[in-house]
Amino acid sequence: MQRTEISTLGEFGLIKHLTEPFKPANPSTLKGVGDDAAVLDYAGKRTLVTTDLLLEGVHFDLTYVPLKYLGYKAAVVNFSDIYAMNGEPKQITVSLGVSKRFCIEDLEALYAGIRQACENYGVDLVGGDTSASLTGLAISITCLGEGEEGKIVCRNGARPNDLICVSGDLGSAYMGLQLLEREKLVFDGNPDAQPDFEGRDYILQRQLKPEARRDIILQLREKGIVPTAMMDISDGLSSELMHICSQSNTGCRVYEDKIPISYEAAVMAEELNMNIVTAALNGGEDYELLFTVSMDDYEKVIGLDNVGIVGHMTKPELGLNLVGRQGEEIALKAQGWNSLEG
Amino acid sequence: MQRTEISTLGEFGLIKHLTEPFKPANPSTLKGVGDDAAVLDYAGKRTLVTTDLLLEGVHFDLTYVPLKYLGYKAAVVNFSDIYAMNGEPKQITVSLGVSKRFCIEDLEALYAGIRQACENYGVDLVGGDTSASLTGLAISITCLGEGEEGKIVCRNGARPNDLICVSGDLGSAYMGLQLLEREKLVFDGNPDAQPDFEGRDYILQRQLKPEARRDIILQLREKGIVPTAMMDISDGLSSELMHICSQSNTGCRVYEDKIPISYEAAVMAEELNMNIVTAALNGGEDYELLFTVSMDDYEKVIGLDNVGIVGHMTKPELGLNLVGRQGEEIALKAQGWNSLEG
């Protein structure tokens, strides 16, 4: 029998390959695989569904991630997917696989984090199960949300000349991860060493306890802006732009000097001798929102707090380009986190 | 810090303990944790949600489970949870964690099984993700379904004197598992040995490729029967009766000679020197429906195909009892599969 290595397709290629043969048949299925969340029509109202499976050693490292934070983050990243459709998360289910290494207090800490996230975002826990695992911890969360007909924003609606907007800053979560990895190595070499986290609160918080950008969604609603396309930035700006451009059939131009970067992340990158722009483009786990709006909405968009315009969409034949500080054009590559090749 | 072993609470106790502090806040959350599926109100229509996490080595053994069957079963057991609420499954999401041992053809086989299940039951795949895992295969499936207001059946509606009904037969899936485990041992001792599966098709099919009892739900609808309580039998009849009795605040009397057992399962039990009634009560993975109906529906119930009456509910103070063939009463114990203690 033929054996083709999974790495030949990559994560997104694999999902596409496996799910393409499925043809939705129910009238209530409006949109299936391929966006931040599925869109269902239940009695005229839009139901959004997204799901995530997190595995110890692949998606998180309990050496430096407290279980309470892990629970918080695992829930919030799902809420982020619902907001990224311009929806409101309402319910989650949580399934756990737990090895004998864990005790009840561990799971209480994990659930305390999930609960805090649910309370902060007004989401209900409605189900799930817990079973044994042979090794480590597995967390599967599914989130349901509500959206309004005609206001749900997918990845395929961007048009040439639309403005490309990004909330918050990019690359901080990645630099937080680099810091944690460095301190872990120091600790491995000398268990008496105390981690050096002074002045690093922001990048650590971005990595360990990210928030979903509900505030941006509320602002968009207040200002009467419905983006033409939107997604959350979980795999890095480059990778997400590729999704939007490919699904919208456009190209894009992004300006390097417009990419929002935090002071702390820049300092950390300098210290580690890394390129902060590369981190911002490819780092991942920012959970900021990337969205496109029509030029007509320019005046409204510049009034948004914590949102910057980083470029604009182009015709597809112009490709995906980063415009450097000297005006040079560099083709964007998606080097996003590909956990299947990790 | 205190460390309490998870086994002190057991699977159901643990879930209850962890989820109790969560208080549903959204008006669309009608029923959260504690039944086969959650019940949500989206614009007046009922949305049902159920989820399942299957881990290699804990929930399945790929030594004898072909991946296509595994995909089929993983989907069908979720459909079964939706039918058990008297609903119709409509959409699923599938998340996979995959170790390097697996190739694309493996995942194609798994998805082919999921697809066949989706086609057979009219369910759409609407999302999910695939990532790496350090060891083995992890499958997380969430299923959404529709139910009609006033016709959704939970576990808490049974009343004393209600008839207890069971579809199909019980214990066959468990005997199929015993057969597979035996042949695996033979194979481990002598890799040239050919497994001896002749005349065992039924119990193997029950273990490897179970079906959800949509046919029973359709019959109930046709006859105008709305059960007072219902669930699917995934952990064994004893365990499920305990759930219904505890949530409905009733006792029950079940008659040993009424428990439906297949010929093949009985033969297999005889051969392995096992008690087939114990297997039927505690074996699990039957995915038959257990439901209770008012005495007034007796005439309608006896007209149902593939459904038998096995006993009746009682006042809670009478406890949960099995009436043996000589009329002796035996207290029912839930020895159901507790994968956390496995």
Image (tube, coloured by chain):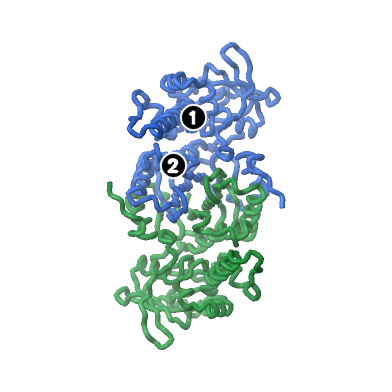
Chain colours: A blue, B green
Q: Tell whether A242 sits left or right of A133.
A: right
Which quadrant is home to the C terminus of chain B? Answer: bottom left
The answer to whether residue B259 is above or below residue A22 is below
Is residue A1 at all visible to an observer of this figure?
Answer: yes
Q: Residue at x 36, y 67 (%)?
A: B248
Q: Position of residue B208 (x, y in %)?
A: 59, 64
**Spatial CA span between label 1 and label 2:** 30 Å
Query: In the image, what residue occupies the spot 52% across and 51% down?
Result: B140
Instruction: Kindly identify which chain the residue marked by label 2 belongs to.
Output: A
Viewer-proximal residue, B297 or A48? A48
Residue B69 falls in image quadrant: bottom right
SS class, disc 2: helix
Label 2 crowd (10 A; few <14 / some 14-19 / many >=20): many
Q: Badge 2 is on which residue?
A: A74
Q: Nearer the viewer, residue A161 or A108?
A: A108
Label 1 CA crowd tier, 10 Å (few <14, some 14–19, many 20+): few
Please state which of residues A110 and B303 is positioned toward the viewer in this rendering: A110
* Residue B217 coordinates in the image, percent (x, y): 54, 67
Q: Which amino acid lies under the numbered mark 1 shown in the image of this protein?
A: Gly
Which residue appears at 64% of the width and 24% of the height? A320
Residue B183 numbered tag? none
Residue B115, how many percent across, how many down? 64, 55
B32 over A261 or under it: above or below:
below
Residue at mark 1: A224
The image shows residue B121, relative to residue A104, as above or below, that is: below
Assess whether mark 2 and mark 1 are in contact (beta carbons under 8 angstroms): no
